[in-house]
Amino acid sequence: MPAGNVPADMPDTPDLDSRRRRLVFRALHRGTKEADLMIGGFVTRNIAAFSEAELDEIEAVLEHWDVDLADWLSGRRPIPPEADTPMLRRMAAECGQKGFGVPPGAER
């Protein structure tokens, strides 16, 4: 994405380098609202602290289909051995917390 050509719905992340900004955008625009909230929320909260190796791990996680990620992260299906990574387990642990992925103000 060329500098100065930032989508209107991109979070305000001027302090992040271009790789991190691209990953945040990619995590927030998965194609399903459920995946956007779970994956995008996790990445947005943690991206600034990720090491280069963790960025590689996030990129690998983002290669999975939304349906699979949503099922794994919500606990509907276990993470299969071929997809099981420390980063995906970390995401699943965070996404399994009560209220995770609920937009602010939407709590009942």
Image (spheres, rainbow, N blue to C red):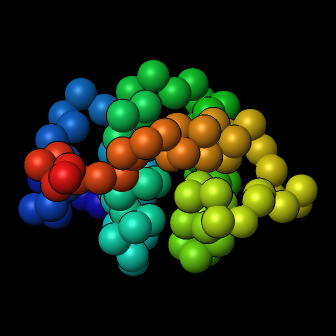
Q: Residue at x 48, y 40 (%)?
A: 97
Of the pair 90 and 108, the residue shown nearer to us: 108
Residue drawn at point x = 43 percent, y = 31 percent: 46
Q: How many marks?
A: 0
Q: Residue furthest front?
A: 108
Corner quadrant of residue 12: top left
Q: Where is residue 96? Give x, y as percent.
A: 54, 45
Q: Is residue 101 above or below residue 18?
A: below
Along the line of sight, which residue is nearer the eye, 104 or 50? 104
Q: Which residue sits at x=89%, y=56%? A: 81
- Asked if residue 103 shows in the view, the reply is yes
Horizontal side of residue 27 vs 54, given as left or right = left
Residue 3 can be seen, yes or no: no
Relative placement, left or right, of 89 versus 12 is right
In the rendered view of the protein, which quadrant contains the N terminus?
A: bottom left
Q: Position of residue 3 (x, y in %)?
A: 20, 51
Q: Is residue 36 left or right of residue 49?
A: left
Residue 66's spot in the image, x, y percent?
54, 72
Given the current orientation, which residue lies at the most extreme right position? 81
Q: Is residue 11 above or below residue 63?
A: above
Please report the residue visible at 69 percent of the width from the left and 42 percent of the height from the top.
89
Q: Name the spot of residue 70 as percent of width and height, x first.
A: 55, 66
- Of residues 1 and 29, the one drawn nearer to the viewer in this rendering: 29
